[in-house]
Structures are given as C-alpha cells and as structure tokens.
Amino acid sequence: MGNFDISVQRFDEFADEFAHRFADVSGYADSIDRFCELIGNDRPQILELGCGPGNVTRLLKARFPEARITAIDLAPKMIEIAGKHLPDVDFRVMDVRDISTIPEKFDAVMCSFCLPFLSRNDASQLIADCAKKLNPAGLLYISTMEGDETRAGFETTSFSGESEIYFNYHSRPDLENSLTESGFEISQLKLQDYPEPDGRITTDMIFIAKKI
C-alpha cells in the first residue's frame, strides 16, 4: 500500500475525530470570504476537492444557498458524515486525481488542504486539471503547508492518535509556477502561521487564482 492510500485509510478510520477537531474553520474565514466575494455569482457551480466531513462545504453553502456544489473525497466515511449534514450537496467518493472525468464545468474550485496529500507532480497536474474544469474567469482556491518537498514523510496528527499520516510540503515558487503555467493569474496570496499541538509552527499558504 502506497503513502497516499495509507493516508486515505487513516482519514476514513478517524473521520469522526477529524470532523470534530477541525469543525472550526474560522481561522481561514477571511480568505474563504474573499474567495466567495470574487466569485461574483449568486448561483455558482462549485467543485470542492478533498471536502472531508464538509466543514468548508458548510461555509460555501451558507454563503451561496442556491449554489450547485459537487464535493469529492476518497474517504467514504468522510463523505457519509458530510452527506448527513448537507443533503442537497452532490457528495461523491472520488480521487481528486481523476477530476478530468467529471463532465461538468465550474465557476469555482475549492481545494482546501488537499495538496498536503499529493506529491509535487500530482499537485501540478491537479492545478492543470482544475484549469480545464473551470469556466472562463473561474476561480481556484488552494491552501496547503509551505515547505521543501524533502520534508515529506509520516507524521502524527491531533486526531489520529498514534497512527501516522503521510504529509507532502510544497514550496511557494513551485505552486506559483504551476498556476502560471496552467493559465492562472494569482489574485491573492496569504501566508499565515499555524501552531501545531506539539509547539511547532507551520506556515500555511492560501492562494486565490483566476483563470485567464
């Protein structure tokens, strides 16, 4: 079993703990609000990648009650939890690396902390796939942890006990290059510190980019 598959298994196993631990997403509310403002459409069609238990999905649905939201995650338990709280959202058990098979086009793509579970190459390919799934002038939101890719490895988390999950780190230049090469213009880049339970400080990167 590969690193990615192990991580998916862990998220499925600890879905309830994750949903509780990260129910409060207020630390990212400003960036998500800005993303929603830039969408400029009261009834957007939104694709959410790595939606987990729907913590960010709830914010999107509250902001756009009439939006058509398709939200995917590869952990079945995560999708089960999300669907119970948001029955009018189209939740699907699906690998984000397969979004090219989705026939619809979207006004916006939300990718909140999905990249930590993708390699550098997979992350670059995902950004290219997002560009193809977006309508003209569509928006892409990406949040992930900043760091050199050599930091990648298994780590304990605040929700999975002693079970480790494999995390990838991405550099700012790599993501900026991938966005530019895929036809995006970066509208906003925010760096913010995230205090880990063990006292370490991780820097989160939040990109909002527009398809040009």
Image (cartoon, rainbow, N blue to C red):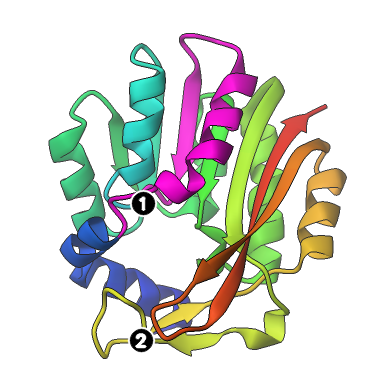
**Total of numbered circles in the picture?**
2
Q: Choose the circle earlier in sequence order: 2 or 1.
A: 1
Q: From which residue to which does the magenta span run?
A: 22-51
Q: Is residue 134 above or below residue 195?
A: above
On the rendered structure, is 103 left or right of 1?
right
Residue 173 in the image, given as x and y percentages of width and height: 84, 62
Which one is in front, 160 or 2? 160
Task: Decide if residue 16 is on the left or right side of residue 58.
Answer: left
- Numbered label attached to residue 164: 2
Establish if 10 lies above or below 212: below
Residue at x 44%, y 86% (from the top left corner): 155
Residue found at the far left of this picture: 84
Structural crowding at the residue carrying mark 1, measured as other residues with C-alpha within 10 Å and reported as few (<14), some (14–19) or many (≥20): many
Pinpoint residue 102: horizontal percent, then vertical percent.
49, 35
Dot 2 alpha-carbon crowd within 10 angstroms: few under 14, some 14 to 19, many 20 or more: some
Please name the residue shown 38% across and 47% down the image: 51
Q: Nearer the viewer, residue 199 or 160?
A: 199
- In the rendered image, the quadrant that contains the C terminus is top right
Residue 73, which numbered label? 1
Residue 29 included in the magenta stretch of the image:
yes
In the image, is 198 to the left or to the right of 142? Answer: left
Q: Residue at x 61, y 48 (%)?
A: 142
As drawn, 172 above or below 94: below
Residue 24, horizontal then vertical, whole percent = 32, 50
Amino acid of disc 2:
Glu
Q: Secondary structure at mark 2?
A: loop
Q: Give the residue at x 59% y 60%.
A: 144
- Rendered image quadrant of residue 141: top right
| Element type at mark 1 | strand
Say the numbered circle drawn on residue 2: none
**Residue 43 counted in the magenta span:** yes
Three-letter amino acid code at the position of disc 1 = Asp
